[in-house]
Image (spheres, grey):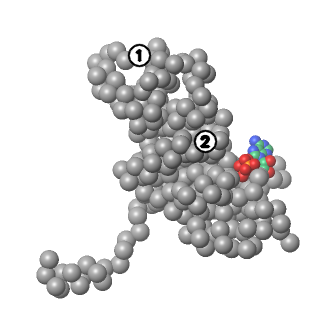
Amino acid sequence: MTASAATNAAARPVEAPEVLLEIRNLEKHFGGVHAVSNVSMDLRAGIVTTLVGPNGAGKTTLFNLITGHLVRSGGSLRWLGRDIAGMKPYRIARLGIARTFQDLRLFNDMTVEENILTVMEPGALPFSLSGPSAREKRAKVEHVMERTDLIDKAHVRAIDLAYAERKFLSLARIMAADARLWLLDEPASGLDPNSYETFLRLLREEVAAGVTVCIIEHNLDIVVGISDRIAFLDRGRLLADGEPKSVLENPELTAIYFGDRA
Ligand SMILES: Nc1ncnc2c1ncn2[C@@H]1O[C@H](COP(=O)(O)OP(=O)(O)OP(=O)(O)O)[C@@H](O)[C@H]1O
């Protein structure tokens, strides 16, 4: 590189990553309760955003609006520039937005392998590793089981797994879905330290490979460990959206978080 090219490169402003999901003036009312109130924010490629806020702040409702499990009362949701408000959850999932639930929602009587296959061939019964694309499917299921340390449990039913293994199975399912945006509801809660380290490593590798993540999390130690950015919600309103340090060190927000508001 010439000296002038180097100077030009240094002078060029750093471009913000691409906006995957654009949320504007989003509203959800349940009768008189404004569960989500005039929320506007962007989820950008490769960024880990954590939704933080006290109980009832609207975090789960926001996830449900993004995934189409709830219909908005107002505002807009655009995925890669396309309006997705009002779309059915399965269509939104096919566009590349996948989600885990706090209660995991696994198929308890299916094996690990079968649970992963269900996201790869939605609606197809029985779930099987046969058929024309069998080799590819098998390779992908095995890859995902290896990444989540579940390869030795391939034929174990979900209900017979330990708690941390069930959490990793919910991640394995999201990985197999090839989604670009992962919405994770308390993915690390209840994990022992070793499992937590495995989870963090997996998350960082996936983000480095291009996945974008939005997490609901209550444990502030976990929030600090995983967030690039924090969105702080309270009573449906977005009170802050920025660098973890600036949000977590804001005394007004911490007072709200710890139920100590004036
Ligand atoms: N289906 C519903 N019907 C009526 N009210 C609801 C419904 N879902 C949520 N709410 C209300 O909306 C508000 C936001 O709830 P939400 O579950 O989104 O909060 P949250 O931040 O996820 O809370 P938590 O951290 O306790 O899970 C609360 O007042 C809640 O009672």
The residue beneath circle 2 is 191
Say if residue 177 shows up in the picture: no
> As shown in the figure, which amino acid type bears the numbered disc 2?
Leu
Vertical relation: 165 (above or below) 48: above
Label 1 neighbourhood size at 10 Å, few (<14), some (14-19), many (20+)? some
Vertical relation: 90 (above or below) 196: above
Say if residue 50 shows up in the picture: yes
Which residue is at the far front?
A: 194
- Estimate the x, y position of residue 171 in percent, counting from the top left: 51, 38
The residue beneath circle 1 is 128
Question: What label does residue 179 carry, if any?
Answer: none
Residue at position x 18%, y 81% in the image: 5
Label 2 neighbourhood size at 10 Å, few (<14), some (14-19), many (20+)? some
Vertical relation: 55 (above or below) 91: below
Q: Quadrant of the C terminus?
A: bottom right
Which image quarter: residue 170? top right
- Estimate the x, y position of residue 65 in percent, counting from the top left: 62, 47
